[in-house]
Amino acid sequence: MTESVLNVMPLEKGFSVATLIKAVKVIIQTQTNGYIQLKTIAGEEWWLDFRVGQLLWAGGGQHRFRRWQRLLKIHCPDLPPSEVRLREAELFDNWEYVALSMLVRRQQLHREIAIAIIQSTLSEVLFDVCQAVGNLSQVAHTTDRQSRLAQPLALFSSTSLFYSVKTELEAWQETALGKLSPNLSPLIIDNQRLKQCTQPRTYQILKQLLHGNRSLRELSQMTGRELPAFSRMLARYIERGIATLNPIDDLASPYAPMAQKVPLQVAKKLPLIFCIDDSPQVGYLMEEALRPAGYRCISIQDSIQALAQIIRHRPDMIFLDLIMPVANGYEICKQVRRVKAFQKIPIVILTGNDGLVDRMRAKAVGATDFMAKPVDPIKVIEMVRLQLAKLDHEVEVN
């Protein structure tokens, strides 16, 4: 396929979100099929693919691969991003879209989930473009009316998407951090003052989260808070000089040298640890602690789906929150122990209320051990090694 010729639009002074939305609508309705390329003065670049006058994909930006991995975790937590690979030896603008299409064809991903990831990607890219509208240096589009994506999974109205994005952007701009990008990363710079002005539990949580290696968007997802609400909580520490916001690099591309990756066949043999907790923050912390230590980890927030996921994946060990809505830890532990194949699997209860009554009740339904919250990554790894070693010893003895 020959390279498409781009028609560069002149950007008038005072180019705003309203004029950007109008320009995008005119392009996709006039050209029918094609894509739009947007660049900032600093060199940041996005692209919007459209077909039959509607949007179907968006990509690019500062955190292309952070966004990809985060959205996979949100919508399909049991599918590790490292297992999503294509035959192509290089990346291209719509690599993620092709990967989603492939997963749907192979029945590794429900079509509805793939569409949800696409819609989230479109919304996030449009949010970033709208926020950076004052710094745009180029808006260009194809004129050959050819689509780069032959078989779209779904099509989206630009009017509906932009309306939703404008609402989100206005809510973000009303916060104290509203002029900054949610792709920035918070970092504690005065640990002593943070300890003095927060409750011990809050201090421990913030200390674990604010290492300057996660974006505001990632932390919002981890804590289960909407982005504006999370930023309002964080703003008071930034305003007082206790924390700061810094740029953070994107993650490595899916085509990093294979020598740096664990082969898929080997990865599937690594011990699988489940974390069943309605807090996304706990799940993220577990994953980030266990994966570098040589374990696979799947976090589940929906307690109703816990037993079905356990039967499907057959984990080697389970961390189980005690207090969850609908089905609590006692009930899930009891259900797991009723399955013959899981009668010896280590089940470690996570609890913020380490009382004697809770311990006795959990032991009665088959819990193996306990771990206090907030989660300590070092203690998590120690617990996993201890329990798996005990399990291996029992197998050898029997």
Image: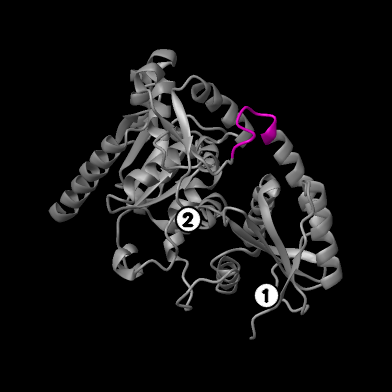
Q: Which stretch did the figure color magenta?
A: 172-180
- Cα separation, mark 2 vs mark 1, equals 27 Å
The residue at 33%/19% (across/down) is 356
Nearest to N terminus: mark 2 or mark 1: 2
Relative horizontal placement of residue 72, taking residue 144 as reference (left or right) = left
Mark 2 lies on a secondary structure that is loop
Q: Amino acid at mark 1?
A: Leu
The residue at 33%/44% (across/down) is 289
x and y percentages locating residue 193 in the rendered image = 39, 17
Give the quadrant of the C terminus: bottom left
Residue 380 is tagged as none
x and y percentages locating residue 49 in the rendered image = 70, 67
Report the residue marked by disc 1.
Answer: 149
Report the residue marked by disc 2.
Answer: 78
The residue at 40%/24% (across/down) is 352
x and y percentages locating residue 385 in the rendered image = 22, 45
Asked if disc 2 and disc 1 are in contact, CB closer than 8 Å, the reply is: no
